[in-house]
């Protein structure tokens, strides 16, 4: 079982990246750049979701990792 | 009217007249014009100078100025309308090197000798005649050179590298003043700009030049050169964060014992790597 804290760290990094990508997607002046950032935002979003589910499952199964 | 007052008034008056005339005559830089235009400029200058200093009667001076302005103006206007007129007035460019070979006949017609040709090439930073594919002598007397393709500097296109299109940066702050037009062109407003400034802890009055780049990041140059410039690093940090996450995900897939989790992590690592490759040209230059 991977350390929940490392998971949470990675998750935090991904969440902030998600927000920055959205910001860049809105600010980009060329359609190509806009599309690239938007897609990255969505992919990172789905990863974040999947990982959040995993983290809550781990916390459920091993309550000592909660918090 | 006393002599000095006369000269003063003429100077001011003709200054304004000349200003209007040269604006009307267009944007060609005096160093890079055809001999025809150069003479026009010179004659206008001399007429003006002589009129200002009362060597020439004011009325006559103005008549001369008008003629020497109207004729070239009309000629140029005609030149832009008709190719025939253009060729007549400006002459045509002469090709002096084609397919790597010097066209001696054309050189002779243009009254340029070999030494001058080599000198002009050196002006364009070309020392080897062997490197030249094509060269043309323009109507201004300037030589423009096309190098052979293997001697032309490499572009991203040649390397087959994907490069993000990069639109021009906009200057939004100049001399401590906010340029609203440029901000609006970017789809931003003063509020956003003030937020950014607060973020870097710099006062608007301290900023000499502020530019916003293709991704919307603000770069500031301050009046006080002793202060280090705040370095924008958001793009690089974003790339680094995603890279770290990708490496972490790979590690997780190796460490976990749960089959489903293994597959999930490994799938995510793959997807993230794909995105990293796409984003690289946009985030890192």
Image (tube, rainbow, N blue to C red):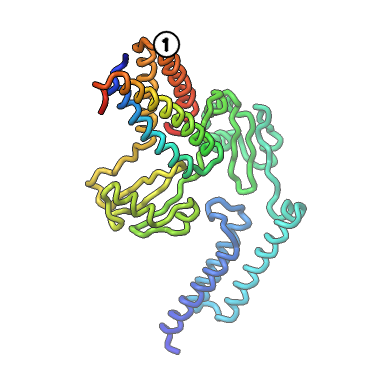
Parent chain of label 1: B
Q: Image quadrant of residue B243?
A: top left
Residue at (68% x, 27% y) in the render: B99
Q: Image quadrant of residue B149?
A: top right
Residue placed most toward the observer, B83 or B52:
B83
Q: Quadrant of the N terminus of chain A?
A: top left
Q: Quadrant of the C terminus of chain A?
A: top left
Residue at (29% x, 51% y) in the render: B198
Expressed as whole percent of the image width and height from the top left, the position of residue B28 reads 57, 55
Residue at (61% x, 54% y) in the render: B35
> Looking at the image, can residue B56 be seen?
yes
> Looking at the image, can residue B244 be seen?
no
Q: Is residue B256 above or below residue A56?
A: above
Residue neighbourhood size for the residue with mark 1, other residues' Cα within 10 Å, grouped as few (<14), some (14–19), many (≥20): few
Expressed as whole percent of the image width and height from the top left, the position of residue B196 reads 34, 49
The kind of secondary structure element at disc 1 is: helix
Residue at (43% x, 79% y) in the render: B8
Q: Is residue B128 above or below residue A3?
A: below
Residue placed most toward the observer, A65 or B136:
A65
Expressed as whole percent of the image width and height from the top left, the position of residue A27 reads 47, 44
Looking at the image, residue B104 sits to the left or right of residue B261; the answer is right
Residue placed most toward the observer, A52 or B240:
A52
Q: Which residue is mark 1?
A: B259
Check the image and name the residue furthest to the bottom.
B1
**Count of marks overlaid on the render:** 1
């Amino acid at each position: 079982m991977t350390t929940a804290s490392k998971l949470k760290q990675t998750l935090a990094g991904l969440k902030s990246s998600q927000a920055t990508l959205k910001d860049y997607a809105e600010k980009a002046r060329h359609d190509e750049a806009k599309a690239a950032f938007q897609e990255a935002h969505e992919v990172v979003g789905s990863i974040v979701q999947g990982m959040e589910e995993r983290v809550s499952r781990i916390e459920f199964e091993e309550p000592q990792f909660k918090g | 009217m006393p002599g000095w007052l006369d000269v003063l008034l003429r100077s001011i008056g003709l200054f304004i007249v000349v200003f209007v005339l040269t604006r009307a005559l267009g944007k060609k830089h005096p160093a890079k014009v055809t001999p025809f235009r150069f003479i026009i400029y010179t004659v206008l200058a001399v007429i003006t100078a002589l009129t200002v200093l009362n060597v020439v009667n004011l009325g006559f001076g103005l008549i001369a100025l008008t003629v020497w302005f109207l004729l070239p103006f009309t000629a140029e206007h005609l030149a832009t309308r008709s190719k025939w007129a253009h060729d007549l007035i400006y002459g045509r460019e002469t090709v002096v090197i084609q397919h790597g070979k010097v066209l001696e006949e054309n050189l002779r017609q243009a009254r340029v000798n070999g030494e001058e040709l080599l000198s002009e090439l050196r002006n364009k930073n070309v020392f080897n005649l062997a490197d030249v594919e094509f060269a043309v002598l323009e109507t201004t007397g300037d030589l423009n050179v096309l190098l052979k393709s293997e001697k032309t500097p490499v572009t991203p296109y040649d390397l087959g590298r994907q490069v993000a299109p990069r639109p021009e940066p906009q200057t939004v702050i100049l001399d401590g003043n906010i340029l609203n037009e440029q901000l609006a062109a970017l789809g931003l407003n003063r509020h956003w700009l003030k937020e950014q400034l607060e973020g870097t802890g710099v006062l608007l009055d301290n900023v000499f030049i502020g530019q916003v780049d293709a991704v919307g990041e603000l770069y500031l140059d301050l009046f006080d050169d002793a202060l280090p410039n705040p370095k924008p690093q958001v793009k690089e940090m974003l790339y680094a964060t995603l890279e770290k996450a990708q490496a972490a995900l790979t590690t997780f897939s190796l460490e976990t014992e749960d089959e489903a989790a293994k597959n999930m992590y490994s799938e995510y690592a793959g997807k993230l790597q794909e995105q990293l490759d796409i984003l690289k040209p946009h985030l890192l230059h």
